[in-house]
């Protein structure tokens, strides 16, 4: 059976065709960077108080029968001020964010099945159309319930776009270009989109105008249909050899290379040890679940950090650029398992260290330390986010790759749905969400060592080619010792903190 990566080696790694595909697909993900985290500003709660009648003799403890008055110092309006999502309705803020991720969960399930059957490109542009139309309709919402329904569909389209974009690029590009695409490509553009969110929110202080500013530019993606090809690898796996050959001929022409002739069709057998695949999927699901809780939990908590939320959002996005550079370097220098596990363990340890800083901080330097630890922890988790996408795409065969990644994303969306409530827990105990996320991240770091290695291995085309599970005993022992040392440091620091408070 002919290996696909070897068959298309004549195209090279960084020709005009590959650069064009990488840039256009990365540009599409730019929009996901500010759409997925827009609720940081759209659902933020400004300072507010009960609207009093003519006299100021309001009785404390009574409901605000005359409504609320909101400060316009930071925002002209948000969905909180639009529909009074405060006091007994304050749960609706984090619920609205969860609705978006619930839509993403359904989108992950849909895009996986649909893309493996009808193609990566078709699924991608259906997602773009859905998100564009329903995103613009959000500005016409007449009630909070209507906004939630539309926001659900926007989340559905967002997840379909990201998964299809990543799988399409991974299957078109060569081995060396694949890592750059997953880290310096779509992940880096996602971070740029995150940073643009703070800029857009700074100038568009009204939630309708901000929503319009975020979704209207998406219409510029429509012409990309004529420049982004379908995955030749997917076409080969479905027996559509002539269409795949036509795309490869066009790619060779763009790169100024002579097309060598017909490539033999790839075998499409799908029999293997299903139990091994299911166990591997479970471990990957656990990692994705924890990474997503940590990533969105810390990202959505940006407005609660010390300082200006616009600056914090920009810093958070900037820290992700550093994270993706670290991910790119690790994927080139270390094995996939070590890269994934090391970032999870570092991120978990830093989150636990963050929880040591006293909750009621008065000292400016402690504020800076707490924010710095949280941002570095987020950097590690963001790097894992990029690594795990590249890693998972290499573990699943072409015949079920989009469905496998879609299933992982579906589980990660469950984590994203829970993330706003982790932030909400901070209203009762600021350290509790950080501690829980830190412990979960450390556990995921250990479990990821059991996954198989995929570095320097061709993408599997059929299930028979999938790598088996493995566990390096020496690596496992080293990690256990590091976790034990981290635990002792945490306990000692906790007692030192308690003693300083008592003093």
Image (tube, grey):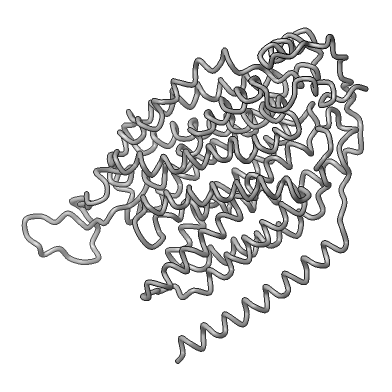
In terms of depth relative to the viewer, which is nearer, 109 or 468? Answer: 468
In terms of depth relative to the viewer, which is nearer, 409 or 141? Answer: 409
Relative image position of residue 312 (x, y in whole percent): 41, 54
Residue at position x 72%, y 46% in the image: 331
Quadrant where the image shows the C terminus? bottom left
Relative image position of residue 400 (x, y in whole percent): 77, 29
| Left or right of residue 50: residue 54 | left
In terms of depth relative to the viewer, which is nearer, 17 or 224? Answer: 17
Residue at position x 84%, y 38% in the image: 457
Q: Residue furthest bottom?
A: 503
| Left or right of residue 210: residue 461 | right
| Left or right of residue 350: residue 62 | left
Q: Is residue 31 visible?
A: yes
In terms of depth relative to the viewer, which is nearer, 142 or 308? Answer: 308
Relative image position of residue 64 (x, y in whole percent): 22, 55
Q: Quadrant of residue 213?
A: top left
Relative image position of residue 494 (x, y in whole percent): 57, 80
**Labels in figure, total:** 0
Q: Residue furthest left?
A: 54
Residue at position x 61%, y 18% in the image: 228
Residue 356, placed above or below residue 447: below
| Left or right of residue 462: residue 253 | left
Quadrant where the image shows the N terminus? top right
Q: Quadrant of residue 174?
A: top right
Q: Is residue 429 visible?
A: no
Residue at position x 50%, y 15% in the image: 223
């Amino acid at each position: 059976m002919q290996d696909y990566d070897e068959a298309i080696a004549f195209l090279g790694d960084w020709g005009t065709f590959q650069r064009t595909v990488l840039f256009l697909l990365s540009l599409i993900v730019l929009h996901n960077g500010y759409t997925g985290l827009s609720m940081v500003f759209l659902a933020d709660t400004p300072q507010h108080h009960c609207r009093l009648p003519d006299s100021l003799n309001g009785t404390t403890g009574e409901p605000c029968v005359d409504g609320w008055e909101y400060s316009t110092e930071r925002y002209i309006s948000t969905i909180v001020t639009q529909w009074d999502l405060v006091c007994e309705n304050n749960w609706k803020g984090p619920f609205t964010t969860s609705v978006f991720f619930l839509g993403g969960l359904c989108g992950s399930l849909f895009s996986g099945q649909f893309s493996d059957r009808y193609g990566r490109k078709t699924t991608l542009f259906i997602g773009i159309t859905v998100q564009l139309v329903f995103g613009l309709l959000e500005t016409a919402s007449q009630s909070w319930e209507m906004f939630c329904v539309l926001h659900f569909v926007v989340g559905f389209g967002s997840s379909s776009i990201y998964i299809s974009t990543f799988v399409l690029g991974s299957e078109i590009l060569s081995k060396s270009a694949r890592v750059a695409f997953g880290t310096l490509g779509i992940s880096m553009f996602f971070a740029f989109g995150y940073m643009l969110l703070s800029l857009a929110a700074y100038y568009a202080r009204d939630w309708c105008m901000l929503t319009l500013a975020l979704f209207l530019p998406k219409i510029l993606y429509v012409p990309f249909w004529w420049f982004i090809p379908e995955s030749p690898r997917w076409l080969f796996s479905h027996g559509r050899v002539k269409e795949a050959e036509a795309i490869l001929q066009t790619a060779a022409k763009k790169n100024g290379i002579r097309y060598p002739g017909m490539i033999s069709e790839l075998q499409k057998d799908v029999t293997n040890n299903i139990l091994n695949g299911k166990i591997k999927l479970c471990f990957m699901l656990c990692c994705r679940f924890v990474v997503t809780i940590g990533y969105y939990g810390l990202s959505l908590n940006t407005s609660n950090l010390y300082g200006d939320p616009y600056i914090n959002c920009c810093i958070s996005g900037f820290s992700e650029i550093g994270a993706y550079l670290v991910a790119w370097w690790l994927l080139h220098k270390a094995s996939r398992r070590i890269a994934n596990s090391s970032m999870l363990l570092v991120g978990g340890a830093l989150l636990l260290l963050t929880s040591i800083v006293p909750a009621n901080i008065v000292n400016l330097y402690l504020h800076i330390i707490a924010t710095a630890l949280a941002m570095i922890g987020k950097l590690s988790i963001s790097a894992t986010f990029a690594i795990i996408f590249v890693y998972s795409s290499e573990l699943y065969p072409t015949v079920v790759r989009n469905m496998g990644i879609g299933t992982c994303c579906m589980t990660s969306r469950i984590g994203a749905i829970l993330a706003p409530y982790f932030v909400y827990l901070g209203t009762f105990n600021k350290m509790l969400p950080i501690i829980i996320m830190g412990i979960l991240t450390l556990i995921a770091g250990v479990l990821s060592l059991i996954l198989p290695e995929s570095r320097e291995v061709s993408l599997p085309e059929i299930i028979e080619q999938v790598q088996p599970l493995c566990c390096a005993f020496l690596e496992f022992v080293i990690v256990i010792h590091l976790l034990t040392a981290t635990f002792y440091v945490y306990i000692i620091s906790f007692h030192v903190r308690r003693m300083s408070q008592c003093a």
